[in-house]
Image (cartoon, rainbow, N blue to C red):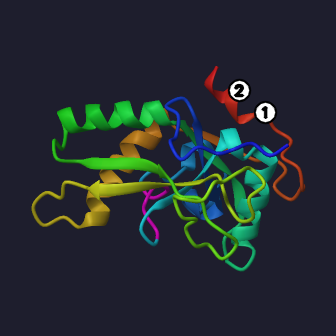
Amino acid sequence: MPTPIPRKIDSEEILVRFINDRDFKSKILDAQKFIHKSVLLPHQGGVSLQREKYCNENCCKKISKGFLVNSNKVYVGFLLFIKSDFDKFIEKYKSENRPDFEAEIISTPLDEELKLIGKSENIYTNTKGYPAHADIIYLNPAIRGDESTATAIRSFAKKFSEKLCKIVIDDMPNEKQYLKNSFSSYFK
């Protein structure tokens, strides 16, 4: 039976970002070689995520591999974090680094053509497209001096991903099924 997907993201939801071989220095798949500063940079407005509560590990793997099919990137795994950790980190980041910094995670369910599904429409786990899609939106990266927007966002992204994100390298990326531990097991 399809599960309704609320537009409000629960504070304890696990959020999933796909990672590919280019997210590692020299494409060496080792957590120590992960390039933290660029994985949470926005592309076409936001940073695409999946909500694990409504998109399980196998679904996340299938979507990731599908998006990379016509690119020169290779799926290798996931970056995971909990929404409350993101929200708390922003408050700490603001108090220690950039008081004007603003970012949020919002539900952005997409249809099959990657168009946003209107807020008046109900969405379910079986809604065609990407109903569990969400985005990190950088509302104010709090640029300093002559730095670029990307540089300001990289500063946040690097610190956040190094401290609070889990890197999950899929040891069997060519398998159809995800064969590692559940995403929730990385937060116990």
Occupied quadrant, residue 116: bottom right
| Of residues 130 and 32, the one drawn nearer to the viewer in this rendering | 130
Of helix, strand and loop, which one carries label 2?
helix
Answer left or right for 97 relative to 172.
left
- The N terminus is located in which quarter? top right
> What range is drawn magenta here?
38-43
- Number of marks: 2
Taking the view exactly as shown, the residue that stands out farthest to the bottom is 70
**Amino acid type, label 2:** Ser
Percent position of residue 53, x then y: 67, 38
Residue 185: mark: 2
Answer left or right for 133 relative to 44.
right
Q: CA distance from mark 1 to mark 2?
A: 6 Å
Percent position of residue 67, x then y: 69, 69
Residue at position x 53%, y 34% in the image: 10
Q: 10 Å neighbourhood of mark 2: few (<14), some, or many (≥20)?
A: few
| Of residues 48 and 186, the one drawn nearer to the viewer in this rendering | 48
Mark 1 near mark 2, Cβ–Cβ under 8 Å? Answer: yes
| Of residues 11 and 18, the one drawn nearer to the viewer in this rendering | 11
Asked if the magenta segment contains residue 53, the reply would be: no
Q: Is residue 82 above or below residue 32?
A: above
Percent position of residue 126, x then y: 78, 54
Answer left or right for 70 relative to 142.
right
**Amino acid type, label 1:** Asn
* Residue marked by disc 1: 181
Percent position of residue 113, x then y: 66, 77
Q: Is residue 183 above or below residue 185?
A: below
Residue at position x 65%, y 48% in the image: 78
